[in-house]
Image (cartoon, grey):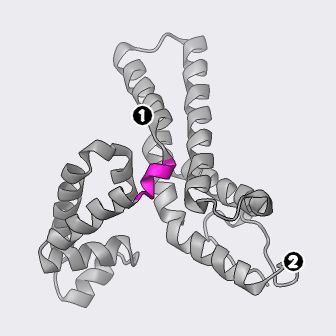
Amino acid sequence: MVLIKYEKRLHLLPIITNQNMEHSSELKAFNQLFADYQQKFIRFANQYVKDEDIAEDFTMEAFMQYWEKRHMLKADSNIPAYILTIIKNKCINYLQHIQIKEDVNERLKNHAEWELNTRISTLEACNPEELFSTEVREIINHTLASLPKQTRQIFIMSRYENKSHKEIAETLDMTTKGVEYHIAQALKKLHTNLKDYLPFILFFLP
């Protein structure tokens, strides 16, 4: 019985069954990790590779790589940061490959070259360990606490409960445009407060 599914990229996922699991708690932990971070990691990768299918591939491959090497990691390893580091490196390799290909075929136009170099350099500077630091979490929690009650509720339903705009609108008896407005306000405030941690705001972008 396959216990983890991803509809669009099912073929990329490891086949994990009760028979090849050492402990049921290990399966539960992996399922929870996947549920908590899959979409966030895809959004992160997609901001750099600009291709959702590739971002999904990199994310699935990173989860598989973690699964295959999980017993080699230290007990106190930061697992989300470990997986995000794999995704980060895949994105860098992908962008550098594009850069080399473009250089061979035709000299990049000035703006395009600058934009691509910026994406590579900012990704290289990103430290996944910092993403899960207490300081960043405190900034996010403080920002959310400072939002109007309805704005905070809508943002949490969208980003933490993975509800669609339509589902939120129906639950709160409002329009989808209203939902979009509140999410935009929350993102604007987070962007301001996380200005020194720019890559982290990508976790909250659509």
> Chief secondary structure of the magenta span?
helix
Q: Secondary structure at mark 2?
A: loop
Q: Position of residue 34 (x, y in %)?
A: 59, 70
Q: Is residue 193 left or right of residue 88?
A: left
Q: Check disc 2 and give the amino acid type.
A: Asn
Q: Check disc 1 and give the amino acid type.
A: Thr
Residue labelled with disc 2: 20
Occupied quadrant, residue 95: top right
Q: Position of residue 115 (x, y in %)?
A: 38, 26
Q: Residue at point 18% right, 89% down?
A: 173
Q: Residue at point 18% right, 55% down?
A: 188
CB under 8 Å between discs 1 and 2: no
Q: Residues within 10 Å of mark 2 (few under 14, many from 20)?
A: few
Q: Nearer the viewer, residue 202 or 82?
A: 82
Q: Position of residue 123 (x, y in %)?
A: 47, 37
Res 152 visible: yes
Q: Which residues are magenta?
A: 128-133
* 189 lies above or below 4: above
Q: Is residue 125 left or right of residue 175?
A: right
Residue labelled with disc 1: 122
Res 204 visible: no
Q: Residues within 10 Å of mark 1 (few under 14, many from 20)?
A: few
